[in-house]
Image (cartoon, grey):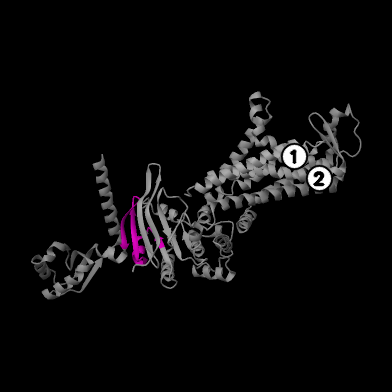
Amino acid sequence: MFNLVSIELYKISRKPRSFIGFGAISVIVLLIELALYLDGQSYVQFIIQQVEQTFQIGGKIINGNLVTYILLQTLIVQMPLLVALVTGDLISGEAAAGSIRLLATKPVSRVNIVLSKFAAGSFYTLLLIIWLGLLALGLGLLIFGKGDLIVLNSDHISILRSSETLWRFLNAFLIAFVSLSVVSSLSLMLSCFTDNSIGPIMITMSIIILFTIIGTMEIPLFDVVRPFLFTTHMIVWRSMFEDPLPVNQVITSVGVMLFHIALFLSLAIFYFKRKDILS
Amino acid sequence: MAPAPIIQINNLSKSYGALHAVTDLNLEVFTGDVFGFLGPNGAGKSTTIRMLLSLIKPTSGSIFIFGKNLLEHRNEILRKIGCIIEKPDFYLYLSAVKNIELFSRLSGFHPSAKKIDEVLELVGLKGREKDKVKTFSHGMKQRLGLAQTLIHDPELIILDEPTTGLDPQGIIDVRNLILHLQQDLKKTIFLSSHILSEIELIASRMAILNKGKAVAQGNVTELLSSQELLVTIESDEVEKAMQWINNSSWNKNLESITEQHINFKLSKNEIPDLTVALNEAGIRYFSISYKRTLEDYFLKLTQEHDRSHENTNRRKK
C-alpha cells in the first residue's frame, strides 16, 4: 500500500495542474495581506461600525490573527475547487489517457487502487491546508504582529485572547482538512464513474453549489434536509472561534463529514471493483 | 503427454445487454507457444484479451492461467504476465525511464537502472530514455510498451496488435523480438494481430475468432496444410501437359492456363504427388510454386461461419 501511495503522490507531484492550488492560494493570500496592509483600517472600520455604537473597541484590531481569520473565510469557498481539480482527475484522468488499462492489469487490487488514490489526494489536500496555514498565519503574524482576535458572529461578538488563538487555528485547519476530504472523496467517487477528467470536477462543484444554496435558503422544505448535507457541516471550522466552544456541534459536524467520506469512498470502491475497463 | 496449458479458457462469454461480444469460447495455449489470435474487427479479440487480464468480467465461463483460476488468484497470475492492450498509453508527463520504473514497481519488481537500460536498448529506445513520453511518436510508444511488458521478466506475454503504427523496420524488429523471446528466453506469447501474414510467420498455434466465436483453432502448419493452394507450374510444354492433364485425374484440380503457366488448386500434401506424376509423364517444367495466404484461409473461414450463422438465424425465424 505504501508503494502504491508513493507512486500516486509522485504522479500528482509531476502534474502541472497540482501546482495551480498552491499558486492560487499564494496569490490570494499575498493580495489580501497587501490590501489589508495598505488599507486595512478602513476595511475594519466598515465591519465594526455597527457594534461601535454599543462598544468601544480599542487596541490593535488588525493583527495576524484577524488577517488569518479573514483569509480562511475567503479561501474556504475556493478551496473545494482547487482540491477537486486534482482529486477529480485521479481515476477519470487515467481512463481518459488510457493508462488505467496498464494500471488495472498490474497485480494490485482495485480496492487498493482507489484507497491509494484517496490517500494521495488526502495528502495533497493536507499540503494545501498546511501551505495556506503557513502563508496566512506565518506571513500574517510577521507583517501584522500578534493581537487579540475579534470575531463578529451573527448574534454575538467573540473576543479571543492572543494566547488562545494558535490552538484554535490549528483545530480550524484540521476541521477544514476534514471538510476538504469530503470534497476529495466525492470527486474521487465521481471520477470512477466517468472516462473524462473535466466531468467529475464540474459535477463536484455543481453539487457543492447546489447544496450550499439549499443550505442557506430559509425555506421550510429545506430545513428537513439541511442537517444531512455535508456542506452544512463544512463551515463548522468557524465554531472554533466561538467562546465557549460548541464542542457537541463540532463533534456532530465532524462525525457527519467522516460518514460522508466513508460513504463516498465505499461507493467508489463498490463501483470501481465491478467496472469493466473499456477505455 | 501433451504439455499443460498455460492458458485455458472454458465456455467464456461476455455480453453487453443484447450484444454478445464473446460466445462460448474455448481456448488452450500451451507453454512455449506463440499463439496467434486472429479475427476481423469486432470479432471479440480485445474483449477476450481484456478478460484474460481481468480488465472486464466475463458474463459466464472460466479462465485458468498457470493452472489457476484467474478470479481467485488474480494478483498471483498477473505478476507473471506482461502485456500491451491495444495502444500503449503511458503517463505522458513522465519520462520513459520513470514510466517503466513506476509500472514495474506496480508489478512488485524494483528494476535497477542497468536493467531498465538493457530493456530500453532491446526495444531500440536507448538515448531517449530521459525524454518525456509526450514527445514520443506512436511507434516509440509501442516500443516503450514492449519494454514495459518485458521489464519484470514475465512468463506469459500478451500482445494486442503490437506492431500497429510501426514502420516496416519496426515490424521486423518486433517480429524478431517475439521469436527471440520464444526461442531463446522460452516465453509463451499470446499475440493478436490484424496483420495476418505476421501470424503465419511467427505463430506456432492459432485461433480464428469471428463474431465472438472461435471458427478454427490448432497448429498453424496443420490448419494451413489442409487449405487449398494455388499451385503454379512454369513449363515450355504447356500443350503436351494439357493433353496429359485432360487424360488424368489431375483434370479436376486444373484452375487456369496461360502461355507458360498451368495453375492447379491443390492441398499442400498433393504437391509431391503432382511432381512425381509430371516426371513420369515426361513433362519438362522449370518451377513449381504455390501461393498460400492466410488472408484467403481467414476470409474463407469467416465467410463460411457467417453463412452458417445466417442459416441458423433463418431457421430460427
Quadrant of the rendered image containing residue A249: top right
Looking at the picture, does residue A227 appear above or below residue A118? above
Q: Which residue is mark 2?
A: A167
x and y, in percent, of residue A262 in the image = 62, 43
Identify the mark nearer the N-term, 1 or 2. Answer: 2
Looking at the picture, does residue B252 appear above or below residue A194? below
Residue A179 highlighted magenta (yes or no):
no
Asked if both marks, 1 and 2, belong to the same chain, the answer given is: yes
Disc 1 to disc 2: CB gap under 8 Å: no
Residue B201 highlighted magenta (yes or no):
yes
Q: Chain of mark 1?
A: A
Helix, strand or loop at label 1? It is helix
Farthest residue, direction top = A220
x and y, in percent, of residue B81 in the image = 47, 62
| Residue B38 visible | no
| Residue B278 visible | yes
Looking at the picture, does residue A241 appear above or below residue B157? above
Q: Which residue is mark 1?
A: A237
Q: What is the crowding at mark 1: few (fewer than 14 residues within 10 Å), some, or many (at least 20)?
A: many
Residue drawn at x 67%, y 38% as measured from the top left: A256
Residue drawn at x 69%, y 30% as measured from the top left: A216
